[in-house]
Structures are given as C-alpha cells and as structure tokens.
Amino acid sequence: MDGCGGGGGGDREDGDGTRADAEVHGIADVTRIPAPWGRTVRRRQRARMAERSAPAPRRLKTMRGLMAKAAGQPKARGLQPPEPPLLLTSQVASDPDTDEDVLWHIAEHAPELRRWLIANTAASAELLEYVAQAGGPGVARGFEVLFESLEE
C-alpha cells in the first residue's frame, strides 16, 4: 500500500485525494493526502469554491431591486401598512372636507348616496348637475329641499 487507500491504479484511485478525484470534482490543487485527511481538505476546497461562485449579498440586493422594478412594485424598505379603504357613508358624502374625486366617485358609483351630495356645500355645480341627471333614490326630494331653502 502506498498510504493512499490501497493499491492497484496509482493516480486513478477514487475517494482518496488523487488526481482522478480532482478531475472528477473539479478541484485543481488536490495533493496526495491519506484518506481521512484528504476528505477534510477536499471539503474545505469545495466550500471555498462554493463561496466564490455564490452571488454577493450586494448583488442580490441589486437583483431584488431590479426584479421589483420590472414587476412594477416599489422597492420594499421595511413593512408599511396598507392604506385603509374609504368607507362610503352619508357622512362622507355630505362632509365639505371630502375630496372632490371622492364626491365624483360617489355620484357615479353609489346612487343611494347621491341625495347626500346635494346637502354638501362644497359640491360643484357640475357635480350637482350630474346628480340631477343621473337621479337615484331621494334625489328629487333632496333638490326640492335645496331649492326651498334658497327661496327663504
């Protein structure tokens, strides 16, 4: 025995750190070390090779950012709670501080709340005209009350 795991082929022995082993596993600088120590050296060399081929953390962050951009998502920087949904109520429809876009959304998509838009002092003439033409439950009575209050 030559101290390398048995006889019979010299450089072509398997599993003991020989050149044949190096060719199979892609390890170029394996030296002839007896069996138990040879495995340890090869493991360390494989670990080093794996570290070299793994993408760097900075590169991963960049890739995640590019993937998020490509998907149309903002780059995540911590957890942020979602914006709460706006519950459409009669109070929202009649509040003068409600945004005009929300008032138009109510006028177009919530016919049961259109009568409350008439009571909103911030409602524009165009919005009130749309509500009058679109109609809905209580809209006619709402305009009667509005016109009666203007006459007084």
Image (cartoon, rainbow, N blue to C red):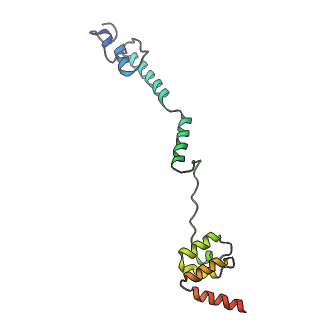
**As rendered, which of 3 and 48 lies closer to the eye?**
48
Percent across and percent down for residue 38 are 39, 16
Compared to residue 137, the image places residue 106 above or below, namely above
108 sits left or right of 50 in the view: right
Percent across and percent down for residue 69 are 54, 47
Q: Residue furthest top?
A: 2
Looking at the figure, which quarter contains the C terminus?
bottom right
Residue drawn where x is 33% and y is 11% of the image: 11
Image mark count: 0
Q: Quadrant of residue 36?
A: top left
Percent across and percent down for residue 58 are 56, 35
Q: Is residue 18 visible?
A: no
Q: Residue furthest right?
A: 152
Percent across and percent down for residue 31 are 41, 12
Q: Is residue 54 visible?
A: yes
Q: Quadrant of residue 27?
A: top left
Compared to residue 111, the image places residue 34 above or below, namely above
**As rendered, which of 97 and 7 lies closer to the eye?**
97
86 sits left or right of 151 in the view: left
Looking at the figure, which quarter contains the N terminus?
top left
19 sits left or right of 111 in the view: left
Residue drawn where x is 29% and y is 11% of the image: 6
Residue drawn where x is 35% and y is 17% of the image: 21
Q: Quadrant of residue 91?
A: bottom right
